[in-house]
Amino acid sequence: MTFKYLSRIACLSALSLMTFSCSEDDTPSSDPSNTSDYRPYHLVIGSSPTGESETYIQGTTVEELNDPNKTFTFNGYGREVPSTRTARLYTSDDGETVYNLNYGGGDIAKYDYISGQNYDLVLTTDIQAVMGTAYPRWTKIDDNYAMLHNVTTENIYENPDEETSPYVRTKATVTLARVDLNTMSVLENTSFEFPYNEDNSGDGIHTFRIDAPVIANGKLYYGVAKRFYDALTGENGTMVYDNVETLVVDYPSLENETTIVSTLAQGSTNGYRTPVAHKDELGDTYQLITSGDASIMKISNGAYDTAYGKFDIKSLLGHNAEANTGWFYVGNGIGYVPVLNTDLGDSASSNWYIVRVDVYNKTAVKMNIPIDLWLRQYQWASVIDGKLYMALASLGGVGNVYIFDPSSTSADGYTTGATLQTGTTDASYIGLF
């Protein structure tokens, strides 16, 4: 039984619900540092490792999240968030507004939270003309602005009209646009060719994705993913990284594009729907490597910090591991990373867990969470009163709100709050916003 079917049942029987709460045509994350003074929080469900996904949302309070006697369910309940693929969500810092990128639908939308499953559509903006695609990605920068971003590629041949013309390189064009979250209108926007390393471009190596920017010292730092075009086969082959790279542009002008590179680690830095880079209280940026071995790099004063080197998380875990989604920063160097045990399965398997990291002291502790986790599409966790709240449940099963205490170095350094039910066999919670 699908969420959509259950939601329709709820609409037919729930006279107490507001008229727009079950519409299939409306709805939509948030700054990670909030206090428990009244602020609504939002549970989101709907991702699937097997294909397309509906996404549903409902609001709650921190008191309910902490209550072990409370059970959350999306059976016949929850507001659908329109999206061709799993929705990309953010909230305002106060939790009263939800923003959604309709990935595949080519629009962004803004909703006011009313109560429960009731969200009021306020504004929607088509962004396909600006971005040139219905599939851009986006990141909330602060409570006023978000960034839309996309990369398109073109294989360049010496004489394009000749079938046997020699391959020259693959051109990657970056498109960026800044969004005013108050009006949901596009402000600055620009396109430029990705600033290639000339040694790589003729070998078919090219950027094909950027994502998860962070602001530091008036610049945007974008994670980068590259791939290899094989001119002999005309197909994209397996990319073997020999470095890590970050795209840098001035903010908010979006000018002066350049890159920073380090050979101390190898892999992509763009992540997958989850924050990847975080600026700490000292102004340094810590960036997760999201392909290859699980590790973290430090960016200081506009460059990779060679003295810091690489924080090799994998070597501390005792098995092969990737952190190919992103991570969540609490403060004072402490964060929590969804990690995949690649010895046991790929990213579609339920072989994920949460690792507490101390980026200052380069320590990593695998948390003792007694459920099988699939976290490939997990998007958001909320910092409340200095602790990290995550909605964690097994795929199609049950789970809890997990409340991680960053002051504890124990694998059991958490408590559990409310119970979470998924309701269908391929559903998973993708965030607590």
Image (spheres, rainbow, N blue to C red):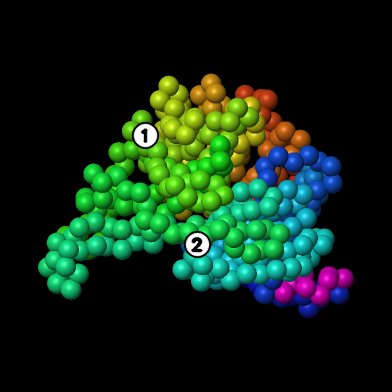
Residue depicted at 61% across the width and 52% down the height: 140
Furthest toward the left, the residue is 164
Q: Which of the image's four quarters has the N terminus?
A: bottom right
Q: Is residue 181 visible?
A: yes
Residue depicted at 83% across the width and 70% down the height: 17
Q: What residue type is labelled 1?
A: Ser
Q: In this view, does 424 lie to the left or right of 364?
A: right
When asked about the image quadrant of residue 110, the answer is bottom right
Dot placed on the residue nearer the N-terminal end, 1 or 2: 2
- Numbered disc 2: secondary structure: loop
Is residue 297 a member of the stretch shown in magenta? no
Q: In the rendered image of this protein, does residue 384 appear above or below residue 201? A: above
Q: In this view, does 119 lie to the left or right of 31?
A: right
According to the picture, the residue beneath numbered tag 1 turns out to be 262
According to the picture, the residue beneath numbered tag 2 turns out to be 136
Dot label at residue 280: none
Secondary structure mostly seen in magenta is loop
Furthest toward the bottom, the residue is 12
- Residue 322: x percent and y percent? 44, 40
Q: Is residue 327 visible?
A: no
Q: Is residue 320 left or right of residue 15?
A: left
- Numbered disc 1: secondary structure: strand
- Residue 335: x percent and y percent? 59, 33
Q: Which amino acid does label 2 sit on?
A: Pro
- Residue 176: x percent and y percent? 49, 57
Where does the magenta region start and end?
Answer: 16-23
Q: In the rendered image of this protein, does residue 240 appear above or below residue 232? A: above
Question: Marks 1/2: CA distance?
Answer: 27 Å
Is residue 20 a member of the stretch shown in magenta? yes
